Every structure is written in C-alpha cells, then in structure tokens.
Amino acid sequence: MWTACLPWAPAALFLLADVIISEDSTPEAALHPQIINFNFEVVQVTWNASKYPGTNLTFLYKLSSDETSSQCSNYILQQSHTAGCFLEAKKDEILCFSIRSGIHLLLTKCQWISAYLKPSSPKDLNFQWHQEAITVTCSDLPYKRLLYEIQYKSMFDTEWQSKEGETCNITTDGLDAEKCYFFRARVKTMESSYGPDTYPSDWSEVTHQQRGQLRDSCQEKKLFPKFILISGTVALLTVFLLLLSLWKVWRVKKLLMPTVPDPKFTFPGLFESHQGNFQEWIKDTQNVAHVNKLEAAEQECIPEDALVVHLVKNEAETPIVTTSPLCPQTEEEEASGDPSQLPFRPMHGGEMVSLGGFTFVMSDNSYITL
C-alpha cells in the first residue's frame, strides 16, 4: 500500500504549496491590517499602503450599535495617500470593516474591539512608606480583568524589579528608605479574558522617592563648591611641596658635592689642540708666552723703581740704589756726582742674597726693604 501511494505524493506536495502561496497572496496578508483600541475611546485601523502605491483606498465600517455602514471621516495619510482610519468607540462592540480600491473589494473583516485593547497609563500615583515597605496606589480603570504592574529600582540597580496586582494598590517590601528609588507603572490585560492580541499601556512618568519624600531626580548633588575646591587646593599644595623638596634636595646635593669645573675653560686649547696632553700643551704655552730678549731690548727702557736696602747700623744708613740690568746707566749718569746713581759695591763679611736678579751682601744686623 505504501508503494501505491508514492505516485500521489508529488501531487499532494504541490497542492499544499499552492494553498500556502494562496494564503500569503490574500488581500489580508498583503494589506496586513492592524487594529488598536485605545481604552475604549478611539479605535485605530491601519494598513500597508505600500502594496498599492499611488492609490487612495476607501475604508467602510459598521459597529454593532450602528444601523448602517459609514465611510471613514478621519483618514490617516501617508505620502498623501490613505493608510488608516480613526473612529470612535464608547464600549466593547463588534467592528466590521471593509477596504476597497475603487469598486474592487480588497478586504472584509469583523472583530470584537476588546481583542485589540490598549489600556491608558496609570495616573496620579500615590506613595506611602512603612519603614522598609512602600504602597503605591492609583485610580482603577472602569473595566475589569486587568493587571497593574509597578516597577522600581535604585541607583545601584541595573534592572527594574516588578510587582503586579489586580488593583492599583500594590505594596513592595525590602526597600531602604535612605536610598533614592525610581518608580513607574503600567496596565496590562489578562490574556484569558482579552486574548493574545492586546497591548500593554504606556509606562507612567517615572517618579523619584527617598525618605518618604518626592524628589525631582535621583542624581546626587554636585559637590563642586566644597569637594572640588578642597581637592584642588590639596593637589596644588602637594605639587608645591614636591617641587620645594626637589629644590631643597638639589641645593643640598650641590652643597655636599659641588660641581667640578670644566678644564676646557681654564686651559684653552688643552683638549681642542692637544687632546688633553698637558705636557704638550704646557710646552706650547711656554713657547707662545716666551718673550724674545732682542725684542725686549729694542723696547724703550722704562726706569724701574730703585731697590733700596737699609742697614740697621748707623754706619750703613745710606741707602744703596740699584738699577735694572735691562736699563744700564748712561755716561751722563755715571759722570754726575749724585751718590744715588753710583754703582753698587758689594760689601765684605756678609752673606750673599739674590733677589729679583740682584745680589746683596747682608750682615747679621741688617735687613732689606723692597
């Protein structure tokens, strides 16, 4: 029997694929209508207008309380073409609508609007602290089978903590009143009563609570006036003391270990010309500093101050004057009768003393004055 069914298998697969393609190509799949019931006040119906570019589709609807169908009076436009409709709904009713392109019917659908309910956000949240617990209350919505969700976290938490209740009267335990907490709330529908296509409400405005009081935010106050000023002053003093200690250390080091002078400036040419050889440098320096005797003899003879030798004894009170060997006495000076210009005669019986190129005879009771 299995082999007899094999010829029919390709045909079955072909029919199944044809059904899937036909379902995907239906007008409802192409338009992909979306319905949102905003708190039983306004119903929004939108469709995919890109499937019919440049075409204004017509939306006709009828609620179970209406006698006749009506055309949408408040279209949603997208690129100047109809893409949805807003209509009023005061209670849970059956909505039947159709979408047409001219005279061609594209889609017809009927659905309870409660299946697409989106409740409104909780308002007027109240907070009551009880030591380490807080109770959050708000006004309940006029319809039942709802879940009220409260979320909270502190500044030290990375994720929200949630707690739910069927009424907007929820108590949360294990809180620290000294910490600042963020609170927010929303409303959800019970899937068992409304189905899986409903939408949760938007979150309420975030409220900040600390020590049982309402705060504008949980951001810590800036500590600029004191903390930053004190920190900056301490940092500047630290840097100043560090620089001062370094300067003191440098002074002490300079005092204990003075800087060795560079011989380059004291002995010019020692390292530049002689590579530090002091003997060669001193020879070269003596040769440069040596004065030629012939050149010195040609220079004008300048009389030198007389070298006076005073004797202690009375008989040697007359000073002895000598002249420099570079400036010999002239004939005129020799002919003059000035005793101060007479040549020095060595004395006998004394000790010979040489000083500045001159030789003197000294006795035990004499001294020399230069």
Image: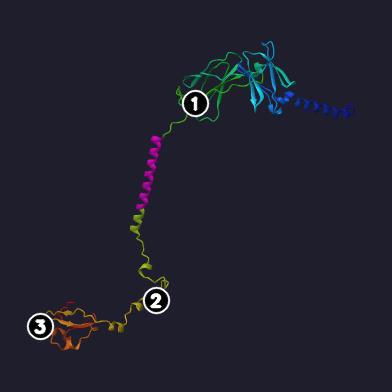
Marking on residue 280:
2
Q: Secondary structure at mark 3?
A: helix
Stretch of the chain drawn in magenta: 224-248
Query: What is the x, y in percent for residue 278?
Result: 38, 73
Residue highlighted by disc 3: 315
Above or below for 166 versus 366: above
Q: Secondary structure at mark 1?
A: strand
Quadrant location, the C terminus: bottom left
Residue highlighted by disc 1: 181
Query: Reading the chain from its start, which is encountered first: label 1 or label 2?
Result: 1
- Pick out the residue farthest to the left: 314
Q: Amino acid at mark 2?
A: Glu
Query: What is the x, y in percent for residue 54?
Result: 70, 28
Residue visible at 39% across and 35% down in the picture: 225
Q: Amino acid at mark 3?
A: Glu
The Cα atoms of the two marked residues, 1 and 2, are separated by 91 Å
Is 68 contained in the magenta span? no
Above or below for 232 versus 143: below
- What secondary structure do most residues of the magenta stretch adopt? helix
- Position of residue 3 in the picture relative to residue 67 (left or right): right
Marking on residue 72:
none
The Cα atoms of the two marked residues, 3 and 1, are separated by 124 Å
Q: Amino acid at mark 1?
A: Tyr
> For residue 40, what is the image quadrant?
top right
